[in-house]
């Protein structure tokens, strides 16, 4: 299912013996645009602790009820390796968490990156909330900013949720329109200057199929979207690799 990050931020994490916390941010890989962690606000039951959880531990979602279910207990979360209060998350801490929770393929691969084990943090690990507001640069000028992210939870329970689209808003458009751009189309990203460079003209982006935040994104909308841009459909690329 395709769901907006802003909707995920409203969700609580339901463990087997009570609520673990609420999602306050999504941490993703800035190269692959795969989600790596939920950044959790544990509230009053575990004050002063920063908790991140892999999407691999999510077994069921109820966005209408604003709840994500996990088989973890509060005690498991409480006894997990402590994290520093702010980014970056160090490679060493990622390895400790992977060992503690027995997380899967991506986290197992982290262990092979020995040269980075003592680095301060993964330079590709990014905060969705921090990237919200980044300006979009088309080939012929600036056109709006990142307002939200559309996340694909299709691989529920397998730890590889991906960010399918950036939600782009430009208040100068008449009428005001919201559109989508797949982040994998980005030609480059200037993390320091907070710019996303897209190899498309402003006119092409402006005239692309409009996105309605109040309506679910279905395959019919995506077919129209990819027909407009004449680009390969990601779901067909995936099916060819299976």
Image (cartoon, helix red, strand yellow):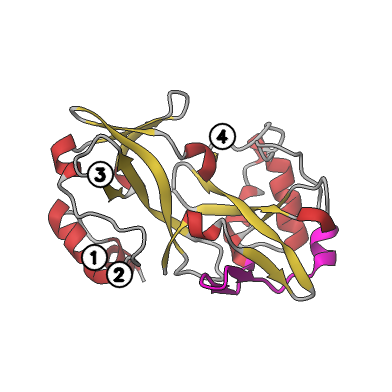
Label 1 sits on residue: 221
What stretch of residues is rendered in magenta? Answer: 57-78
Q: Is residue 40 left or right of residue 207?
A: right
Callout 2: SS: loop
Which label number is shown at residue 123?
Answer: 4
Q: Reading the chain from its start, which is encountered first: label 2 or label 3?
A: 3
Position of the N terminus, as image quadrant, is bottom left
Question: Mark 3 and 1 residues: CB-CB less than 8 Å, in contact?
Answer: no
Callout 4: SS: loop
Find the distance from the CA under tag 4 to the CA under tag 3.
Answer: 35 Å
Q: Residue at x 17, y 62 (%)?
A: 224
Callout 1: SS: helix
Which label number is shown at residue 218?
Answer: 2
Which label number is shown at residue 176?
Answer: 3
Magenta highlight on residue 10: no
Q: Residues within 10 Å of mark 3 (few under 14, many from 20)?
A: few
């Amino acid at each position: 299912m395709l769901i907006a990050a802003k909707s995920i931020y409203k969700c609580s994490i339901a463990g087997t013996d009570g609520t673990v916390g609420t999602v306050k941010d999504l941490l993703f890989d800035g190269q692959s645009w795969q989600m790596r962690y939920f950044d959790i606000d544990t509230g009053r039951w575990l004050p002063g602790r920063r908790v991140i959880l892999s999407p691999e531990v999510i077994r069921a979602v109820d966005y209408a009820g604003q709840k994500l279910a996990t088989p973890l207990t509060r005690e498991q979360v409480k006894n997990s390796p402590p994290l520093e209060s702010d980014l970056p998350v160090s490679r060493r801490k990622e390895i400790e968490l992977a060992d503690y929770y027995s997380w899967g393929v991506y986290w197992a691969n982290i262990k092979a990156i020995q040269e980075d084990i003592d680095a301060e943090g993964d330079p590709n690990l990014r905060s969705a909330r921090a990237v919200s507001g980044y300006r979009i640069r088309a080939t012929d000028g600036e056109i709006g900013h990142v307002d939200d992210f559309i996340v694909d939870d299709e691989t529920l329970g397998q730890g590889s949720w991906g960010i399918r689209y950036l939600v782009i808003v430009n208040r100068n458009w008449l009428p005001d329109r919201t559109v989508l751009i797949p982040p994998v189309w980005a030609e480059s990203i200037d993390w320091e200057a907070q710019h996303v460079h897209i190899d498309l003209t402003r006119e092409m982006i402006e005239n692309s199929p409009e996105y309605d935040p109040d309506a679910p994104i279905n395959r019919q909308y995506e077919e129209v979207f990819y027909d407009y841009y004449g680009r390969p459909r990601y779901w067909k690329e995936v099916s060819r690799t299976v």
